[in-house]
Amino acid sequence: MRILSLVTSDNANFYRQQTRQLENRGHTLDTVSVSGTNVENGAQTERRPMSAYISYYATALTSSINNYDLVHANYGLSGPPALLQPCHPVVITFWGSDVTGSISQLSQICARYADAVVVMSDEMADLLNVDCYVVPHGVDLEQFRPVPQSQAREKVEWNSDAYQVLFPYGPAREVKDFPRAQRIVERARSRLEQPVELRTMSGVPHDHVHWYMNAADALILTSKREGSPNTVKEALACNLPVIATDVGDVSDRLDDVTYSTASSDNDVLVEALSDTLRASERSNGREVVADLGVENQITKIEAVYESVV
């Protein structure tokens, strides 16, 4: 198939992964994205100007007159130009924050008029209240795999004598709620005899992330909202225990995973993190996410494409 792919940010790792895999299967994708990037600056995020989106919408509409089998809009802000073009069927994939955050109303409207809607979790489907295909982003199980912790710690130059807790984002992203992670780790630290270090991860190339996950003793996710966070699935693929707020599909992902907990209660999260660090064991996460490989995701996306063409 020939696909016009509209996306607000084509540097998202999971988007690039999906595009690469579709091309490997013989599909042709032409991508139109918003120029520039959202940049973290201290505690704030600098947003792209409205002019960038006006230019993006115009380019998307102009591009759509070409010979495509369908238009695939990725993220809610890509929905309007996809739906305004009259030539091709439209698939819209929502990523999470576009359904739960500030543009949720726009996403609701776009979902009603798309030929097919893809979401990351059942929770997102319930919020949109339309028929949806639930297709979480896949994990590269060859890249995200267990490696010896001693080897990983040497690679990332972490202290091997302290417990290492990984917060898998930069501290500036408000929705990820780093201060809450700090409070939970501080309370867990007071219960343990061994030192505990809280690590953040900003600017790390995606092909290095698995080293940090294997070097850590636990991953802590304290997001205020999520869809189906890739970082949780990647951590599970490395058998890294996960302590997380109960957002998106995290609770479902952690069901039956050892040394891992999802809860909205800080007391529960502190207790779980303390117990997990004290146990010093890896989880069984990899066997739980075995069906979330990239190949399975792309097969499901292809089925969605076939349903609208």
Image (cartoon, rainbow, N blue to C red):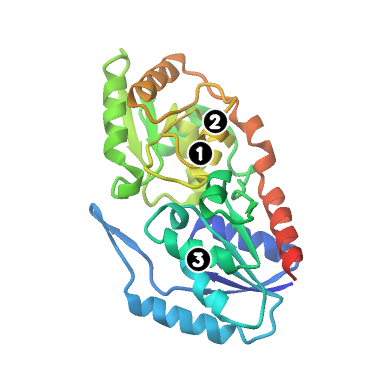
For label 1, the residue is 232
Q: Amino acid at mark 1?
A: Val
What is the distance, in whole Å, between disc 3 and disc 1 at their CAs?
A: 29 Å
Pointer 3 or 1: first along the chain: 3
Residue 158 shown left or right of residue 6 in the figure: left
User: Which quarter of the image is occupied by the N terminus?
Assistant: bottom right
Checking the image for residue 11, the label placed there is: none
Pointer 2 or 3: first along the chain: 3
Question: Marks 3 and 1: which is nearer the front?
Answer: 3
Q: Are marks 1 and 2 in contact (CB under 8 Å)?
A: yes
Quarter location, residue 163: top left
Residue occupying image coordinates x 48% and y 36%: 213
Q: Position of residue 276 (x, y in %)?
A: 44, 19
Nearer to me, 199 or 208:
199
Determine crowd level at label 1: few under 14, some 14-19, many 20+ residues with C-alpha closer than 10 A.
Answer: many
Nearer to me, 302 or 280:
302
Q: Amino acid at mark 2?
A: Leu
For label 3, the residue is 109
